[in-house]
Image: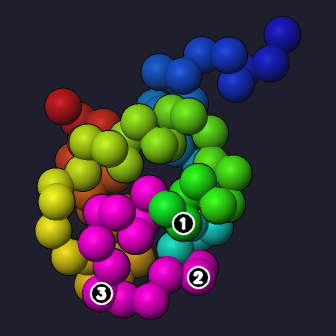
């Protein structure tokens, strides 16, 4: 029984490597759409894509901006 079956659980324990994978090829500033596209290309789990869909539609200037936004969405 893998832990990946529980999407809510995977969001509670967001692996920093997933954020790193998504942001490693992003040219900043990046829009929400850029992040979603990169996540899909990187094969991110559906839970991550769902979280990205909840991001504000704005420009993100750094990996720290993205990590901060992930934390905001998770606290909702």
Q: In percent of the image, x 54 and y 66: which residue is there?
A: 38
Q: In percent of the image, x 34 and y 63: which residue is there?
A: 33
Q: In percent of the image, x 47 and y 21: which residue is there?
A: 8
Label 2 with label 1: CB-CB less than 8 Å = yes
Instruction: Tell me the residue that label 1 is attached to.
Output: 38
Answer above or below: position of 9 versus 52. Answer: above
Q: CA distance from mark 2 to mark 3?
A: 12 Å
Observer able to see residue 29? yes
> Which of disc 1 and disc 2 is earlier in sequence?
2
Q: Position of residue 49 (x, y in %)?
A: 47, 43
Answer above or below: position of 35 versus 26. Answer: above
Label 1 with label 3: CB-CB less than 8 Å = no
Q: In percent of the image, x 26 and y 57: which residue is there?
A: 69
Observer able to see residue 16? no
Instruction: Tell me the residue that label 3 is attached to.
Output: 29
Element under disc 2: loop
Q: How is the image coloured?
A: rainbow
Answer above or below: position of 44 versus 27. Answer: above
Element under disc 1: helix
Q: Is residue 61 left or right of residue 24?
A: left
* Mark 1 crowd level (few <14, some 14–19, many ≥20, 10 Å Cα): some
* Mark 3 crowd level (few <14, some 14–19, many ≥20, 10 Å Cα): few
Tell me where the magenta segment starts and ends, as one range.
24-36
Q: Which mark is residue 62?
A: none
Residue lying at the far top in this picture: please name it. 1
Label 2 with label 3: CB-CB less than 8 Å = no
Quadrant where the C terminus lies? top left
Q: Position of residue 55 (x, y in %)?
A: 24, 51
Residue lying at the far right in this picture: please name it. 1
* Mark 2 crowd level (few <14, some 14–19, many ≥20, 10 Å Cα): few
Q: Is residue 41 left or right of residue 61?
A: right
């Amino acid at each position: 029984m893998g832990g990946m079956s529980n999407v809510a659980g995977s969001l509670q324990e967001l692996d920093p490597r997933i954020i790193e994978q998504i942001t490693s090829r992003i040219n900043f500033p990046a829009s929400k759409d850029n992040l979603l596209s990169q996540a899909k290309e990187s094969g991110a789990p559906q839970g991550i894509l769902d979280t990205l869909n909840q991001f504000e539609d704005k420009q993100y200037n750094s990996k720290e901006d993205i990590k901060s936004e992930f934390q905001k969405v998770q606290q909702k």
